[in-house]
Image (tube, rainbow, N blue to C red):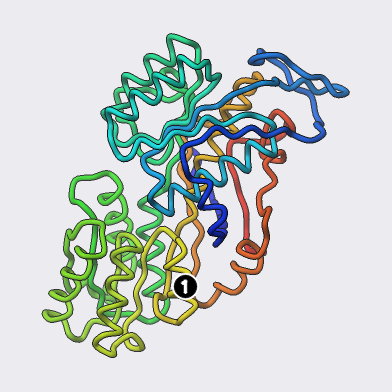
Amino acid sequence: MKKYLVIFLAFLLMLTAIAGCQSSTTTATAGTTAGPTTGTTAGTSATSGTTTVAKDVTIGYSFPTKNNEFWGNSLDYVNKAAAALGFTVDAQDCNNKQEKQVTDVDNMIASGIDGLVLAPQDASVCPGIVAKCKAKNIPVMIVDRWPGDDLKAGTDYLGFIGPNDEEAGYQIAMALINAGCKKLVGICGFQGTSVAEGRKAGLDKALAENAGKVELLQFDWAGENMDQGDKSFRNLLQSNPDLDGVWCYNDSLALATVNVLKEKNLISKVKVGGMDLLGPAITSMENKELYFSTGGHYMQSAFATVMVFDALNGKMPTEKVVKLDLLNVSQDNLAKFKTKYVDNPTPIDFKSISQTFNPSAKTYFELSLD
């Protein structure tokens, strides 16, 4: 049974943190421990009171690219989890190349990693990597990109964490509708991809719930980058000069739209929503330009390392497939978000969400702005 999880996540706008995105090996030591742990542990173990925690644990982290703020934030939080729980991270950036990712993981396995968090470049790398790790009894968490239905979470690999794309698409649309937009256009990613189709399904759901109140004037499968967003929105605006809201698949498309609206002196008349909640989006909201962004799923890799660490301490995930509902931030609640998270260097208590240190913890990670 899948649980849909609510996750309200933080973004730390720190260049020094992003600098930690280079492929590296990071070692951290946990502080005091509390709560009983049972089951098989990797490496040696340390006992404090009734708690036995595996020591000298190394968790591999293979991800697409360090040259992207999203994955930079992901690595930053993986390192924070390692520092809190006391394991070593072997992080490797595959530079968006499937063959390099396979080689990177082969090298990790040969070096003796105890567990792996895999953010696949695409689903094609998953079967081979999962099979190699399974043969070595290395637990694998897969994040962000669905590995395909042929592999079974909980059987072939430990589990999956990724964003709830349909809910994200729905929240983008509802933010615009609730703000008074009645004439929408949509700019989406690549047709046929699970993430783009899921977000469009969320848009369709919001439109169906508000039939007669809001109209989708036009929809375009544009792509994912700012150049594609710029071209798409210029065409949509020319065809629909009376639009008052723009639903965007991600923040790159949304920020390209904002730039065109500023150029045309229309930014005060049209609201724009996107997804990812990265630095430029937050800056744009601060400047009263971009209206809304949903995101924070860069935290999923850190949560996955917690689940791998717990598995190595004999604590299996309470759920095998985790779909994250994301943080919804608009110009209206941006200040509250920044106070709690941007200005707070340690917004996540990783021990509290680890079954190793908190036996009552479940495989969900719920935060709030309150």
At 33% from the left and 24% from the top, the residue drawn is 102
| x then y, percent, for residue 258 | 31, 76
At 11% from the left and 79% from the top, the residue drawn is 239
Q: Quadrant of residue 29?
A: top right
Whether residue 213 is visible, yes or no, is no
At 24% from the left and 59% from the top, the residue drawn is 188
At 28% from the left and 90% from the top, the residue drawn is 265
> Front-most of 28 and 311?
28
Count the marks: how many?
1
**Above or below 341: residue 112:** above
Give the quadrant of the C terminus.
bottom right
> Front-most of 58 and 310?
58
| x then y, percent, for residue 157 | 44, 22
| x then y, percent, for residue 38 | 72, 17
> Front-most of 150 and 349?
349
Q: Which residue is mark 1?
A: 283
Tell whether 258 sits left or right of 354: left
